[in-house]
Amino acid sequence: MDGHTLTAEWPDTINPLRLLGWLAFETVRWCGGLGTLFATSLVAWLRPSRAGEIKLLKSAYQQMVWLIIWGSPLVILLHIGLGSFLALQAFHGAIFLDAVGPVVGVGLFRNVGSQMSAMIVAGLVSTHTVAELRLSRSKADRIHNGKMIDRDVAKGLRPQSELLVPDHARLTAGRVLGAMLAGPVLGFIGCTAGLISGLMVSRSILDVPTVWFLYNFVEMLWARDLVGILVKGAVFSGAASLIACHEGLREPEGSASNLGVAMWRAAVLGMLAILIANSAWFTLMFLGGAPFGRTVLEPPTPR
């Protein structure tokens, strides 16, 4: 034998087929892990808290408050730019002042407000949640000065080596619910900030009366637009938080290797999920026909 084996090895250079197979396998494995985590996080609400664990509702409340406090300045700044841009674009594009209020207000409340706010949430959870779960998972949901000690261990019924480890499903459930509660709040804050910004630009530059701006806006606003802020804000933010939790829990606790890549991947996939969900909502609500209401311009009537 000349030392050659019957088994062919992959060359050192990049092989397209190998790369394609790796991507397919990793995609299936990643999606399977995400689905499993989502299902188990739903079941986690049925299990009572263990010794030292914070209650799930309290954990969700803390996550919601954290996202609202840290996300509000970013959401407001982003929507101030959007509101002023939409006001100028409405005038220069439509060439009539009646469209300024509907384009700014309805454009924010119906279309981009919830989506942009959820993008901010995706950026926040992709950094904070991923790092928290990767580096200090066992301390994430403890009661203040509490200890993660199983009752059976404390009673001597189980050995010290069998201490309970943090429940991944429980860690995820509180964070996802907190993001779902914070999403609509941030969406409404952003839309309101953008509406005020567009109103100020319309008054100072376009000389549009405030009453006329608000009247045309309210005239074109439908109840489904306000429902959309609640539904889209909850779904978009919850999806981004679920992806961030999945990325944070994929590696063992304390593993800082590839942490930046995990944060980047959580942000990219979270924003991609938001875009897909927003497209699905748009297809359902705005391309479904007349029962869902009109837009700024009346649809053409068939002859």
Image (spheres, rainbow, N blue to C red):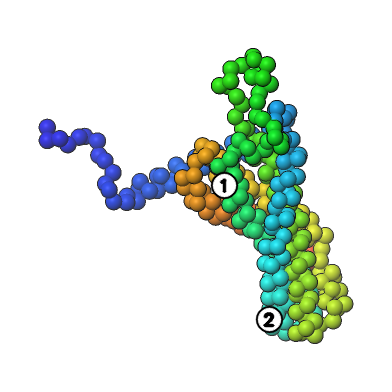
Amino acid type of the residue tagged 2 in the rendering: Gly
Identify the residue at the far top of this view.
Answer: 157
Mark 1 nearby-residue class (10 Å; few <14, some 14–19, many ≥20) = many
| Along the line of sight, the residue nearer the viewer: 91 or 47 | 47
Measure how far apart labels 2 and 1 are at the Cα level: 44 Å
For image coordinates 40% across by 44% down, the residue present is 21
Secondary structure beneath disc 1?
A: helix
Q: Kindly indicate the quadrant of the structure image that contains residue 83.
A: bottom right
Percent of width and height locating residue 277: 64, 54
Q: How many dots with numbers?
A: 2
| Along the line of sight, the residue nearer the viewer: 189 or 292 | 189
Q: Kindly indicate the quadrant of the structure image that contains residue 42.
A: top right
Percent of width and height locating residue 76: 72, 65
Amino acid type of the residue tagged 1 in the rendering: Ala
Residue 93, label in figure: 2
Q: Is residue 113 visible?
A: no
Is 7 located above or below residue 292 in the figure? above
Is 204 located above or below residue 74 in the figure? below
For image coordinates 80% across by 85% down, the residue present is 207
Is 194 located above or below residue 156 in the figure? below
Residue 131, label in figure: 1
